[in-house]
Image (cartoon, helix red, strand yellow):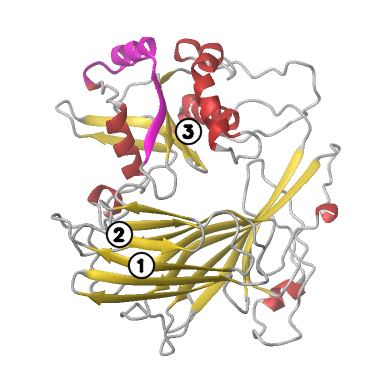
Amino acid sequence: MSLRALWIVSNERGQNASVRFSRMFATVEHRAKILAGSSYVAVPEESIVLQLLLTELGLSDPNKSYVALRDDCLHHQRSPALELHINSPERGVLWPVLAISQGPLILACLPLVDAPAEPRPPLASLLSISQGLTFLAGVQSFLLGSGGKPDSEGLASRLAMLPSVLLQVCPLGTPLDVPLLGQPAAPAVPTSVGNQKLPAWKTGLHRGRAVVNVALIETVRSMQYGNQSRQDLWDVYVTLTLPPNGSPLQDILVHPCVTSLDSNILTSNSVDNYDGSAFSGPYKFPFSPPMEPFRLCSYTSQVPVPPILGSYHLREEKNQLHVSVTFKLHESVKNNFEYCEAHLPFFNRNQMGNVDVKVSSGQLDVSKEKNLLVWGLGQKFPKFREVTMEGTISFSGSTPGPSDPLCTELTAYIKLYFKVADMTLSGCCVDQHSVQVYSSAKPRIVTSRDLISKDYFIWNSTGSAPVSSGQIML
């Protein structure tokens, strides 16, 4: 297997995406040209690849409600082998572009396909697909480390080392640490692996101590209006990738590999929210796991209050907006964020002119071109767990800003992005010592739990806002 090109893209929240690293391999490209003949499609410049990749992944033009290449119902994303439609004089389709994402990074590569372009061979017959994904996973581990949470300095230093690393592990575009076609991967030392079944994306045997990673991710959504005539809504739904214990759980869905379920768990799905007899755990899930990472179960849970309560007030005078924002962190929430940001977009107005806004804590970034305020609240709220924003914004620019058909006049919102490690609102957790593995190996058990926001909106209380008649739909 050989690579025609490799790209590493940074796509931080609220920031423009950029190509942090790219490499094209001329010798492999020459082979691709010979193999493809008249149907050869050259690899375009990295700026074109960036835009096409973001569009194909649904990450382009977040301020536009509709983009044909991204949102058209006739468009089918063919993950993991993407098609990039090049609108250059030559035109054509770049295929198969493999892409994986983790945190702030998107890693993509274009493997060489040793087969005629037409008719297109099925993915299952291409060893280069699984080998390419394996290679991307290796580069991802090198850049992000085992924890997958790099600091900016560590990531920058590893990106600087990447050219020399590629010379060692991928000379002339051919990775060395993948098995060749027709040759099984042989471990460096003899090991007893028996009839070990390998996942399609992993073409070599696992080496080293067995590890079981159990991640509990609790996601909170909220619609807050700050108006007595509209009821604030919030819900919590959870995914357990690879058993929980806490407040009663509802709407439990499990992976097909789960071999049996306690009848109490099934009963808990239909128990009234306020019934004190609801089963509250512990929840046990016996299962025979597949070889690849998988979602063991998902469920919802009732929590009495949202983690961050917000109020948002806008008042318009002539061509100025008076802005007043307050956030209160609930006492039950751990005051230690991995990140916490508030985005205040303003639609259907001219571009921002003068911005005179003060915040009581954190840092405020102003993007006049996007009519966007980004309030970085940092990793901690102040001791009294309340922060405020006050000020005025004029929209005196000569060009119109972004538009949204929903957000007209004083209809506006704040969207919160936050993550809290080692906590859940429902109190659910995985007991590390209760994870039982029936295997000759003695794996190391690693557990984690995180609280993450998604679709967390605070609407302007002085304007109209979309209202749901019931609970937020999952």
- The image shows residue 130, relative to residue 289, as above or below, that is above
Q: Which residue is mark 2?
A: 355
State which quadrant residue 323 falls in: bottom left
Q: Residue at x 59, y 18 (%)?
A: 179
Label 3 – label 2 distance at C-alpha: 55 Å
Distance between the alpha carbons at the discs numbered 2 and 1: 8 Å
Quadrant of residue 403 within the rendered picture: bottom left
State left or right for residue 227 relative to residue 199: left
On screen, residue 438 above or below 10 = below
Answer whether residue 340 is visible to the viewer in this image. yes
| Residue 237 sits inside the magenta stretch | no
Does residue 380 appear to the left or right of 196 in the view shown? left
Residue with the mark numbered 1: 391
The part of the chain drawn in magenta is 17-38
Q: Mark 2 near mark 1, Cβ–Cβ under 8 Å?
A: yes
User: How far from the left and from the top, in percent, is residue 239?
Assistant: 61, 59
Relative height, residue 30 to residue 205 (above, below):
above
In what element is the residue under mark 2?
Answer: strand
Q: Is residue 256 visible?
A: no
Answer with mark 3 or mark 2, whichever residue precedes in sequence: 3
Labels 3 and 1: the sequence-earlier one = 3
